[in-house]
Image (spheres, rainbow, N blue to C red):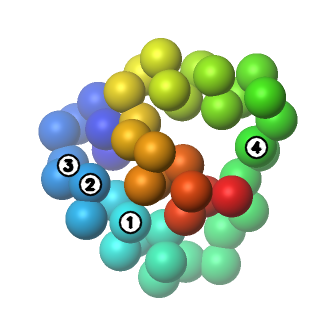
Amino acid sequence: MIELGFDEQVIIDKIESTNSSFETSLEELKSLKLLGVTQNIISIMI
């Protein structure tokens, strides 16, 4: 969704509206950060 240009709040709303679990290993978090995922989104994912 980041790559598609969705606003941070839209991504957060989507995460909060689903019953998803995310891979949050250090390597995966590093990859997300490099892709431009914000700290707020990463916090919600954890």
Q: Looking at the image, is mark 3 or mark 2 nearer the viewer?
A: 2
Q: Quadrant of residue 23?
A: top right
Image quarter of residue 29: top right
First along the sequence among labels 4 and 1: 1
Identify the residue shown where x is 49% and y is 68%: 15
Q: Nearer the viewer, residue 38 or 19?
A: 38
Pair 1/3: label in front: 1
Q: Residues within 10 Å of mark 2 (few under 14, many from 20)?
A: some
The residue indicated by pointer 2 is: 8
What is the three-letter code of the residue carrying label 2? Glu
What is the number of the mark on residue 12?
1
> Which residue, given by chain and number where applicable, does mark 4 sit on?
24
Question: Of the residues shown, which amino acid type is indicated by label 4?
Answer: Thr
Separation (CA) of disc 3 from disc 2: 6 Å
The amino acid marked with disc number 1 is: Ile
- Marks 3 & 2, CB-CB < 8 Å contact: yes
Q: Mark 1 and mark 3: span between their CA atoms?
A: 10 Å
Side (left or right) of 31 relative to 5: right
Location of mark 3 (residue): 6
